[in-house]
Image: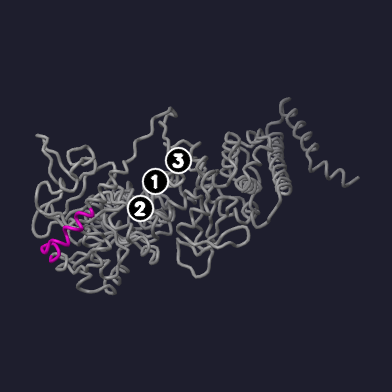
Amino acid sequence: MIPQSFIQDLLNRVDIVDVVERYVPLKRAGANYVACCPFHNEKSPSFTVSQSKQFYHCFGCGAHGSVIGFVMEYSGISFVEAVKELASGAGIVVPEEKRDGGAEPRKVPPSTDLYEMMQRAAQYYKGELKRSETAIAYLKRRGLSGEIAARFGLGYAPDGWQNLEAVFPAEYAGQSMLDTGLVIENEQGRRYDRFRGRAMFPIHNAKGLIIGFGGRVLDQGEPKYLNSPETPLFEKGRELYGLFQARRAIRDVGRVLVVEGYMDVVALAQYGVEYAVATLGTATTPFHVQKLLRQADEVVFCFDGDDAGRRAAWRALENSLAQLVDGKQLSFLFLPQGEDPDSLVRKIGKEAFEAQLKDALPLSAFLLRELIQRVNLQTQEGRARLLQDARLLVTQIAAPALGLMLRKRLAELAGVSQEELEAMYQIRSESAKPKVPPKAARAQPSVVRKLSEMLLYRPDLAGTVDTTCLEEAEGLALAGVNAEEIALLREMLEFLCAHAHIQSSAAVLEGFRECPGAARLQHLAGGLFAWEERQLDEAALAQEFDGAWQRFQELIRNAHIHRLHAKLQHEGWDEADKARYRELQRRATASPKNQENKENRV
């Protein structure tokens, strides 16, 4: 875990404008900066960066966040990776702490020497490719040009047990060679090169640094593909081959194609399908899916049409369910028997290949098709089996709309109502939730939401209010306000009071990243620029915040009075109730609003 204090310090040191300009050319527009959005195609700029709030927002696609969020989305990397990248650029070291809060020495990151060693090995393999007529002939036979081989840094590991000893004379016997995965040490302590007689495919991380290799035999032999082992640099369940080279094309077309082999990626790029990536000799993992969905709105998994391909596709589907997002599409393309993407694109060309991608089977259709094939829907037992088999899968789906539609379709297939299915799955139906009164539904955005927006815009306002009234709001039905809004306001005030040094909207967002209200706060963040456009000075904003806070307190008082009136009608009051009523009336009379009304009447 990275300490929250460090994240806040990092946000104070790093300027979002400087960082974004490394990736996107910005132009000043008044107090802010604008550009064409890097996350979707557009001709006129709608991507806006606020230097004062250290925040970005696209008015076209809705993307928004802090500098950490920008690096995550643009580079397709995790939160921790983004923090470490920004810290490295700022020249500071990332500390870590135990989950119980105790201090823990920082985990030692991969040595820069390891990256350098991987680069030296890649240069050696490239040089050997140029000298090997056999390897060159193999790549030409596969239809690859010298240009595409250079783009992906292809090389060749010649036969021989210890060729790398000449490349690393001082390091070959040391621990670093084992840490890179370039050599293997047997039980007798003898070392030899891991890759021999193979075409070599360097694997890059999001920064373009080489973290591993994939080696493919030139003719017959097993294993056909050999990958680097797990190392301090390389974790195959989190990396995708070709993603570094494909990022620009993925953004341009809004699609990423996932294939099974390195040669498929390179061959597709040779024929103009430049948005393909490959898993690294492992089944598709949830981390892969998370990374893919950061890159594009459409993910197409491409598998062989045989039984092994369908089993691999099913594993990919299972590992995708908890990562699904409404508005993003995952689909599956099954190739004709005996074909792979490499052979098919060479046979039919780019246009025909991409036409097949458009006919890929959506995840929902693939899921239902596979489940239906296992049962007999003409019998009650078969329909019951369908519901049972689907339960674990459907209840994992993270996308609310897609999950709802799949439940409706399953209910139709099984001959039950949606309510009966959801009761069986222990899912609370939207139709079963309490209805919002029509008056509240027509109300303007609540005063509580407005307070939360202003706190996000100006965190220092948290120190200007007495928060005890939040305890009084517990369990009350406030007009036009839902419980989630009150919970978020409470979370924000507690957080800001505990971190009085926080000064920017971005720091609030990052501080809330692991909090229950994080998603709701992100939803509010899109309105930050609306407050900025109003150009209120500090005094005017403080006055508006104070007025909203007084209205919030008035809502609480009115709700308590309403509750007491209801009790009086049904049960009667005791002395405590009478005292409570007098106190509420006194506070209402003493409120600034009533005082102002009294002065106006005078």
Of tags 2 and 3, the one toward the viewer is: 3
Three-letter code for the amino acid on which mark 3 is drawn: Ile
Position of residue 561 relative to residue 315, above or below, is: above
Q: CA distance from mark 1 to mark 2?
A: 9 Å
Residue 271, magenta (yes or no): no
Q: Secondary structure at mark 1?
A: helix
Of mark 2 and mark 3, the one earlier in the sequence is 3
At horizontal 9% and vertical 34% (from top left) the residue drawn is 188
Q: Label 2: which residue?
A: 206
Residue position marked by numbered label 3 in the rendering: 92
Which span is picked out in magenta?
122-137
Magenta stretch: helix, strand or loop mostly: helix
**Residue type of the residue flagged with mark 2:** Ala
| Residue occupied by mark 1 | 81
Identify which residue is drawn at 47% across, 50% down: 69
Residue 446: x and y in percent read 64, 49
Instruction: Find residue 471 and report its horizontal and vertical position in percent.
Output: 63, 33
Image quarter of the C terminus: top right
Query: Disc 1 residue type?
Result: Glu
Apparent side of residue 382 relative to residue 189 in the rendered image (left or right): right
Rounded to the nearest angstrom, the CA distance separating label 1 from label 3 is 14 Å
Give the camera-side residue of 362 and 207.
207
The residues tagged by marks 2 and 3 sit, at their Cα atoms, a distance apart of: 20 Å
Return the mark for residue 214: none
